[in-house]
Amino acid sequence: MSTTINLDKSKELNILCTKGYTFGPLLLQMSVTNSDPKEYYDITQWSFEMKAKVSSFQLEANFQFTDLIKGENGQLLITKSASEMNLIQAMTYLYELRATLPNGESYRIINGKIIVKDAVND
């Protein structure tokens, strides 16, 4: 009999987008689970990074999201301009969004696939 402990609390979210078109805005809102009323994390002191790779074995990311805007009530806005998206090759990538707290603890918030499709008009 096998026992499993899941220490990965991240959520899987697959994203479909188009090369050469603006990505997002993708708005995430981080809250404490099972709280009533809903309690939001104060993420103002957290740092975030979101990277995408063709393979999890790659050392370097194919691209990353640098426009991560922290808002009120645990909100994180993720965007990428059309000109930046035009530089990304159309294919399927693996990605993860990582948060690092002021005390140095690091957590994967979401992960999944980013499928970048070719634009028809380009």
Image: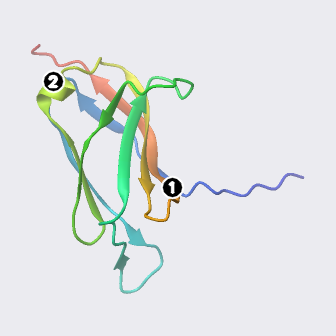
| Residue at the bottom extreme, as displayed | 37
The amino acid pointed to by label 1 is: Ser
Pick the front one: 3 or 77: 77
- For residue 29, above or below residue 62: below
* Quarter containing the C terminus: top left
Q: Which amino acid, mark 2?
A: Gly
Q: Which residue is mark 2?
A: 20
- Residue 10 numbered tag: none
Q: Position of residue 51 (x, y in %)?
A: 39, 36
Q: Which residue is mark 1?
A: 106
In primary-sequence order, the first of circles 2 and 1 is 2
Residue most extreme to the left = 121
Q: Is residue 76 above or below residue 56?
A: below
Q: Which residue is painted at 52% across and 60% down in the image?
A: 105
Q: Is residue 22 above or below residue 87?
A: below
Q: Is residue 115 left or right of residue 83?
A: right
3D distance between C-alphas at marks 2 and 1? 32 Å
Question: What percent of the width, then of the height, locates residue 1?
Answer: 90, 52
Q: What residue is drawn where x is 40% and y is 86%?
A: 36
In the image: residue 27, left or right of residue 32: left
Front-most of 18 and 55? 55
Mark 2 vs mark 1, foreground winner is 1
Q: Quadrant of residue 61?
A: top left
Asked which secondary structure carries label 2, the reply is loop
Q: Could you tell me residue 86's position as x and y percent?
A: 18, 21
Disc 1 packing (10 Å; few <14; some 14–19; many ≥20)? some
* Quarter of the rendering containing residue 115: top left
In the current view of this chain or complex, which residue is farthest to the right?
1
